[in-house]
Amino acid sequence: MNARPQREGQTIIEAVIALGVLTAGFLGMLSLLSHSFAENRRISEQTTATYLAAEGIELTKNLLDHTMYYGHVGGTWPCFSAMGTYAFDYRILTDGSSCSTLSPASPYWIAAGSVAPLEFDTSSDSYIYSPSSGSGSCAWPPPAGNGALCRGITIDYATGTVGSDAVIVHSVVTWRGHEVDLKDEFYNWY
């Protein structure tokens, strides 16, 4: 007598187990892909913020050089009449402003208030302050979780008094609870 083992139902169980293993594998890949996209976005934002913070330092240096080029004579810092936090972009040198406009009365001064966020301008291929864009503003200092790119350039004197031979510049860019803070010192070579 030939007795065949009963295999009824085993094919369905094998198919369900195989489907479960495949589903777990696909869900793992989707999770990995999702985390990869999130990390890619975070790194991209951090790179942009680092470049914008470095741009803040360069803008400050350019203001000093701009003033020297246009014939500043004297022994004090020509651009920074007051210690504080400012918000300016490259247009400060191209819109007819002189660096003597950097004072508490200037539109570039950030008091305990707000500043327009930095936004990418496709016509100039750069980030600029665009207060008319309607995308909100950055409270300064910015709260954690704000998604906008906010930059403040803080000017301080090495001795704590205006007229010092060295100025300390902090360029801080914040976004979504993250922060990039770059620091540089410039010496009065006028």
Image: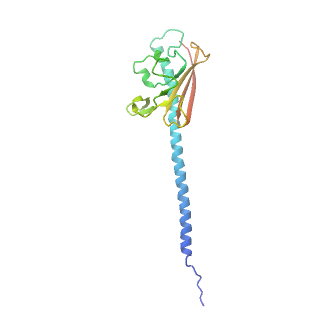
Q: Among all residues in the image, which is located at the extreme left?
A: 123
Identity of the residue drawn at 53% across and 16% down? 82
Q: x and y percent of residue 163 in the render? A: 57, 12
Q: How was the colour assigned to the protein in this rendering? A: rainbow
How many discs appear? 0
From the viewer's perspective, is residue 17 above or below residue 168? below
Asked where in the image residue 135 lies, by quadrant, the reply is top left
From the viewer's perspective, is residue 163 above or below residue 33? above
Identity of the residue drawn at 40% across and 21% down? 95
Nearer to the camera, 49 or 82: 82
Nearer to the camera, 177 or 20: 177
Q: Among all residues in the image, which is located at the extreme top?
A: 74
Q: Among all residues in the image, which is located at the extreme bottom?
A: 1
From the viewer's perspective, is residue 180 above or below residue 29? above
* Residue 55 seen in the figure: yes
Q: Among all residues in the image, which is located at the extreme front?
A: 113
Quarter of the figure with the N terminus? bottom right
Q: x and y percent of residue 152 in the render? A: 52, 27
Q: x and y percent of residue 167 in the render? A: 57, 18
Q: x and y percent of residue 100 in the render? A: 47, 15
Nearer to the camera, 11 or 108: 108
* Residue 130 seen in the figure: no
Asked where in the image residue 171 lies, by quadrant, the reply is top right
